[in-house]
Amino acid sequence: MKLFIDTGSVAEVEEIAAWGVLSGATTNPTLLAQESGDPGERIRRICELVGGPVSAEVVADDPETMIAQGHALAALHEHVIVKVPFGAAGLQATRALTDDGIGVNMTLVFSPSQALLCAEAGARYISCFMGRLDDVSIDSAEVLTGIVDALRPCGSSTVWMDGSAQVLAASIRHPAHVVTAARRRCEVATVPGKVLRQMLGHPLTSSGIERFNADWESIPALGEWLSALVAGEPAIAAA
Ligand code: E4P
């Protein structure tokens, strides 16, 4: 499963892209409204930083405006994927944008039947919101399984190779959501920076590093040996 970052913040993408784990990003109107500066410049910068698909969302109710906004957003950068809210107008816009060669991420999808319509309209990504489902006591893991099974009835492991839609787990609230999305065979999870940072932590990792460092530093010659090695200097016996 690929990891995208769910954010409108360039600084956050700069920080986490440096880890080498991001394949793309998603934004939404709420996330972009939380930051200052020209949104187009921010979307372009995020595209450069992640070097992969970056979703930018249309904000309209009618298909004609969605299509016009979608073309304008796609023109910002070759990595832009146009995010379109689910609904009859969104499906119409998705079909038109897809036919024009523009990748679409259909968002606010909460059921397998909605996902089937997204796939038929040509969406490249189908965003199922885990956290918002759990908020209303609907088991997001069950819904994800339903969507994945509906789109891959023969149990194929991935679908995009044949041009079908990829399931994108969104509205991720904690690391367990990310693991659930992977285990339910989603192609992508888009994860807020806060949750990506939480995924780093484990008390045994911290205590293990502390112990390795303390043991190494207890013999100063070992540190001198490693510094010399890094500097390409002749070997020093680390007795
Ligand atoms: C997905 O692309 C959305 O931007 C996002 O995951 C929504 O998450 P929220 O429910 O935390 O707002």
Image (cartoon, rainbow, N blue to C red):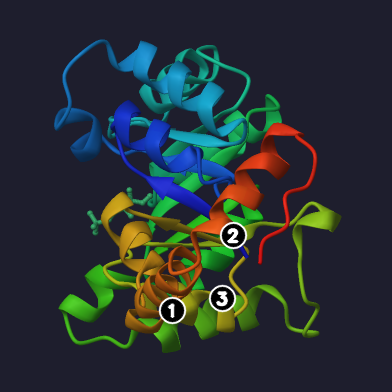
- Left or right relative to 181: residue 65: left
Q: Which residue type does callout 2 highlight?
A: Leu
Circle 1 packing at 10 Å, graded few (<14), some (14-19), many (20+), is: few
Circle 2 packing at 10 Å, graded few (<14), some (14-19), many (20+), is: some
Give the label, 1 or 3, closer to the camera.
Answer: 1
Q: Mark 1 sits on what residue? A: 208
The N terminus, quarter of image: bottom right
Q: Tell me the distance, in whole angstroms, between the alpha carbons under discs 1 and 3.
A: 27 Å
Q: Mark 3 sits on what residue? A: 182
- Left or right relative to 47: residue 107: left
Question: Are the residues tagged 1 and 2 within 8 Å (C-beta)?
Answer: no
Give the label, 1 or 2, closer to the camera.
Answer: 2
Which numbered disc flags the more N-terminal residue, 3 or 2? 3
Q: Position of residue 103 (x, y in %)?
A: 62, 35
Q: Mark 2 sits on what residue? A: 222
Q: Residue 204: which quarter of the image?
A: bottom left
Relative vertical location of residue 234 with respect to residue 49 in this rendering, above or below: below
Q: Residue 161: which quarter of the image?
A: bottom right
Question: Are the residues tagged 3 and 2 within 8 Å (C-beta)?
Answer: no
What residue sits 60% from the left and 26% below the top?
79
Q: Which residue type does callout 1 highlight?
A: Gly
Q: Position of residue 201 (x, y in %)?
A: 35, 70
Which numbered disc flags the more N-terminal residue, 1 or 3? 3
Which numbered disc flags the more N-terminal residue, 1 or 2? 1
Quarter of the render that holds ligand 1: bottom left
The C terminus, quarter of image: bottom right
What residue sits 63% from the left and 28% below the top?
102
